[in-house]
Image (cartoon, grey):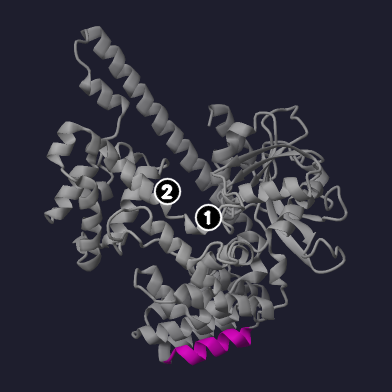
Amino acid sequence: MTPEQYAAVFLALLGNEPSEPAFPQLLNGGPDPRYEVSLAPCTRPVAPSEIDGQTVVCGTVSVPEDHGDPDGEILSLAFIVYRAHSLAPVSDPVVYLHGGPGGGTVDFVSSVSFFFDHLRGRRDVVAFDQRGVDASGPDMDCFDTLAANVGEVVDSIVGTDVPDLEATLISGCIAEIEGRGFDLPLFNTTQNALDVRAVMSGLGYDDYNIYGVSYGTKLALEVLRTVPDGVRSVVIDSVAPPQIPLYDTLFVPHAQSIMNTFGPCEADRDCAEAYPDITQRFWDLLDGLQEEPIDVDGVEIDGETLFTIFTNSRNDWSDPTTRGFTTYAPALVTQLEEGDVTMIRQMFQGILPPQPSARGALDAAYDLTPNEVALAQAFVNALDQIDLASQTAAQTLSQLEQDFDAAGAPATLGEFFDDALERAVAALPERADRVAFARDYLNLRFVAPRAGALLDLVQTHFEDTAQQRLSSTLALLDQDDIERVFELIAVDNAVLEAVVEGEFELMLYACQEDFFGGFNSSDGFVTTIESLWNGPRHDSIAHGKPFGPLCGL
């Protein structure tokens, strides 16, 4: 961000900017009465990049659950609009269609702002969560399913293998949500495509451009096929065309990244001599670690974990500590074969491989005159100061935003009670008792907020001093405080909820659209993996997950 942008955010947070809304057409329900708009605060953090209500606006657009029956049930799709930086923007924005299915985007205001800032020179950028996904599916949370499996979900989070957990959660979610009245077959790509046009109409855009990623490319193609009105241009990134058995081939690029990691060494005479047959040794190492994992400072490394480390290090552009990883891969394999964890420990610490920097370049320079050294050192010092000042400004603005939000919504007795409840649960001596509490706590998600339900929870799970203290605090709560406690029930369990719904949101679409007549199947997945190697298939390298069983195939 530039100093001017930081200053704009700072002044806005202090209330010294004009209060005129940046999106006046959305304040009264939006310009299209078929798709009513309701504005709401954006998910924090918004600063330091944005100003809620001025550079960015959030809310929901109401769309039919079935576009063929516009007078039927209604869904609320959560959106973000990022305002163009220009004072005279063009009228056709860019709409981002996220991947997954089930990727979601609305809860990540700052991240989306960073990714698409380059498109905002002359255009607004719109992002929304597709139907049934994240912020667009709050009434589709599978809390009953989570409550019934909370112990197993917690086990999976801490790394314990829980067989068939995903299938159990998916089937449970289906039954729970259908029991709540949702017509799940309507959560499909055809209805999603109609949602795209509805969202853009609801926000007042006649013409627009599409940027789709992964599943978003399939959705973009469906928009062109079924409802192309107003589409000016389409960019499809990481294409997932519907005619390709995608789920059969998900493992292929991961395996190719491994082959490409060791390929340069195999082709280089000196490297091949120093690390002979290094590709096969890597696969053999995975098999060995799958049988006998090693411990690295409390982290268990088995074959699956090491495979993930290699593929992520090769492909994660956002992690600067992995740049240049290929150079070190053969040596890392050799060390692990010998039980030496020095290099992988350095990876975990973020110091392998060495990262390029201005100071490192200066230290490596030679044949510089004293004057050149002084100028270069001054330049490096200036870079350090700029970086420090930028970090300080960003941290200050983020904290200022938090402080203003807290001042606008001060802590209540409801939050005090919830904190006390959390401490009391942590003090329960037996895991079984904590799991039992969690089940009942989660089951309150869809109960009308009332003090009696909380009192029953306290009396069921606590005794003596803890029960007396919680009951006394509960007696002080008014109805607003009680409603706040019930709001926190959802917030407190967001991590657990993500585990339950992560695969469900994906399979909600995939099972309906991508698995039929042998097109994408467990057998096809295994056949694809076996075709990647001439030799015998190794269990650890074939670990990629076939999705067919999750669809009952």
Give x and y (percent) for residue 417. 52, 75
Q: Kindly identify which residue carries mark 1.
A: 246
State which region is magenta.
451-463
* Tag shown at residue 253: 2
Task: From this view, report whether residue 444 is shown above or below residue 545.
Answer: below
Residue 238 figure quarter: top right
> Three-letter amino acid code at disc 2?
Pro
Give yes or no for residue 533 being in the magenta stretch.
no
Let me know if residue 260 appears in the view. yes
Question: Was residue 460 drawn as part of the magenta stretch in this picture?
Answer: yes
The image quarter containing residue 12 is top right
Q: Place residue 371 in its image quadrant.
A: top left
> Is 311 in front, or is 34?
311
User: Does 207 sit above or below residue 67?
Assistant: above
Residue in view at x 32 percent, y 22 percent: 380
Residue found 35% across the figure and 28% down from its top? 384
Which kind of residue does numbered mark 1 sit on?
Leu
So how many labels did they put on this image? 2
